[in-house]
Every structure is written in C-alpha cells, then in structure tokens.
Image: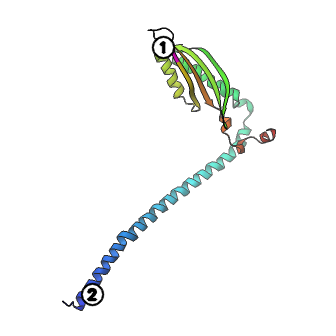
C-alpha cells in the first residue's frame, strides 16, 4: 500500500509530535522541576547563611558589651550561679512540701571540656511531694540542671513517708565558652 505525500507528511508530523512530547515528559519537565527545586533550596540556604553570619557578627560584639557592665550589677561568677542553683532547689522543695535534711555542693565533675557543678540533696516527704520535687527539677527553666543519681527508700514500711537522696548536676556554662569569647589577658594567665 502506497501512501500519498499528504499522508506521509501527516505521519512524519505525528511521529515528530510524539517524540517531542516524550522528550518533554521524560527529559525537559523533570529537568525544569529539579532545577526549580534546587534554586529554591539554594535561596533558603543563602538566607540561612546570611542569618548565621549576622548572628556571628552580633556574637563577636557581645564580649565588649559584657565588659561594660559593672561587676556589682550581675552575679556572673561561679559562686553566684551556684547560689542560684541552691536557692532554686530550696524553693522547689518548699513548693513541693518536701523537707530537706541536706543540701550541699559537692564540687565540680569534669568530663572532657565540659564541667558540671554537682549538688547533693537529701530530703523526706510523701510520695506526691517527692514526685512533685523531681518533676520540678526535671522541668526547670534552667536547662543546664539534670538528675545524675537518685535513691528512693521508705522510712517506715506501710506508711507514705519516703527518703530521697539525689545528686543534681548543673552544666558549667563557662566551660562552653569559645576561646575567642574569653576576656583579653585570660589566655596569658593560662
């Protein structure tokens, strides 16, 4: 069977359109979608980079600002932070109606570059008061506090009277400071 010139042209045009549609479907459209997705990711990363650079620039300006604050206005020393932690533990025990028999700092515990201030707490109370105290410690607004060790015992069998011994660790924030944020002249002392 012989095709006319018109039928041959229609056949060639049809095959060409099918090839073009297949190329568009399998090559061009996925390429353009991938390119658009990568461009949007690139813009997000550029925005994050700019934000990070702004934070770093702001961070580099902070040490001079902290040096301008007179020493008497803030308690930034280790004794001030330790006192804050002790008073927080005392107030949590009072709020939970747990009687403290011992609250003392044990000193520092160092693991690698991080250091922790450890506090030993011994108290007595009911199951509800002890659980409320533990809940307050775990959900404190001070994210650097955590319970290291805990012992819970009944003082008398069959009575809701418990003794709690707990060691609470507080992350020492000075150990987290980067060397470039330390005060000038501190490196010379070390």
Residue 63 shown left or right of residue 46 in the figure: right
Q: Are marks 1 and 2 in contact (CB under 8 Å)?
A: no
In this rendering, is residue 30 above or below 14? Answer: above
Mark 2: which secondary structure?
helix
Q: Position of residue 182 (x, y in %)?
A: 73, 41
Judging depth in this view, the residue of 110 and 41 nearest the camera is 110
Disc 1/disc 2 C-alpha distance (Å): 95 Å
Q: Residue at x 74, y 39 (%)?
A: 67
- Is 167 situated above or below 48? above
Q: Residue furthest right?
A: 188
Decide whether residue 178 is among the magenta residues: no
Residue 123: name its quadrant: top right
Location of residue 131 in the rendering, given as x and y in whole percent from the top left corner = 48, 20
Would you say 167 lies left or right of 18 here? Answer: right
Above or below, 106 relative to 44 = above
The outermost residue toward the left is 1
- Please provide percent x and percent y for residue 12: 29, 84
Side of 3 where 182 appears, left or right = right
Quadrant in which the C terminus appears: top right
Magenta residues span: 152-157
Tell me the number on the disc at residue 9.
2
Which is more N-terminal, label 2 or label 1? Answer: 2
The residue that appears at 52% across and 21% down in the rendered structure is 133
Q: Which residue is denoted by mark 1 in the rendering?
A: 126
Identified at 58% across, 54% down, the residue is 49
């Amino acid at each position: 069977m012989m095709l006319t010139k018109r039928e041959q042209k229609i056949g060639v045009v049809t095959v060409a359109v099918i090839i073009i549609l297949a190329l568009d479907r399998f090559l061009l459209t996925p390429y353009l979608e991938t390119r658009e997705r990568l461009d949007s990711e690139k813009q997000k990363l550029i925005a994050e980079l700019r934000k990070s650079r702004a934070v770093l620039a702001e961070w580099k300006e902070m040490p001079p600002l902290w040096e301008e604050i007179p020493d008497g206005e803030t308690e930034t020393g280790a004794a001030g932070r330790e006192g804050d932690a002790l008073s927080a533990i005392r107030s949590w025990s009072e709020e939970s109606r747990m009687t403290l028999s011992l609250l003392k700092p044990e000193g520092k515990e160092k693991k690698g570059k991080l250091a922790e201030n450890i506090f030993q707490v011994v108290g007595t109370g009911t199951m509800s008061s002890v659980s409320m105290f533990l809940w307050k410690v775990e959900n404190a607004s001070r994210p650097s506090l955590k319970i290291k060790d805990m012992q819970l015992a009944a003082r008398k069998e069959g009575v809701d009277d418990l003794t709690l011994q707990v060691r609470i660790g507080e992350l020492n924030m000075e150990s987290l400071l980067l060397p470039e944020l330390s005060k000038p002249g501190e490196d010379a002392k070390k």
